[in-house]
Image (tube, rainbow, N blue to C red):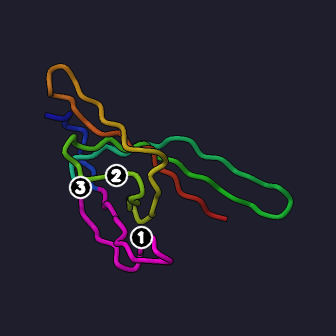
Amino acid sequence: MLPSFMKQTITRIRPGTRALRGSDVPDWGSATRLQISGCSVQPAGTSLSQDGRVLALTDGLTAYLPADADVKAGDRIEYAGEVYTINGAPRVWPSASGGLDHIQLNLERWSG
């Protein structure tokens, strides 16, 4: 069982697929959504980029999900009205006792 502070809910957004020039590519127009409860979402890094042409902001979160959560690289996560991409692959954290098994997601969103 995960700790009692894991009370937040996120929404996993997974794209459908469509054929394009002989390859399957993500189709966000036919994405499916799944709510995942029992999560903990924490602030991570943020950065500001000013190169003289563009002002860009990167905002990051770390999300901890139950071990059986259906997430994978390429999914997007909606939390608190914002949509984030999963940066890298979901990390599975097994514990020796089975009580703290969980998945860690590094989330990012860009604006600017």
Judging depth in this view, the residue of 34 and 90 nearest the camera is 90
Judging depth in this view, the residue of 17 and 69 nearest the camera is 17
Tell me the quarter of the image containing the C terminus.
bottom right
Crowdedness near tag 2: few (<14), some (14–19) or many (≥20) residues, C-alpha within 10 Å:
some
Q: Identify residue type, mark 2.
A: Lys
Q: CA distance from mark 3 to mark 2?
A: 13 Å
Sequence-first disc among 1 and 2:
1
Mark 1 or 2: in front is 1
- State the mark number for residue 72: 2
Instruction: Answer whether residue 86 is magenta in the image.
Output: no
Query: Viewed as shown, does residue 64 lie left or right of 58?
Result: left
Q: Quadrant of residue 50?
A: bottom right
Magenta residues, as a range? 10-36
- State the mark number for residue 36: 3
Q: Which residue is mark 1?
A: 24
| Helix, strand or loop for disc 3 | strand
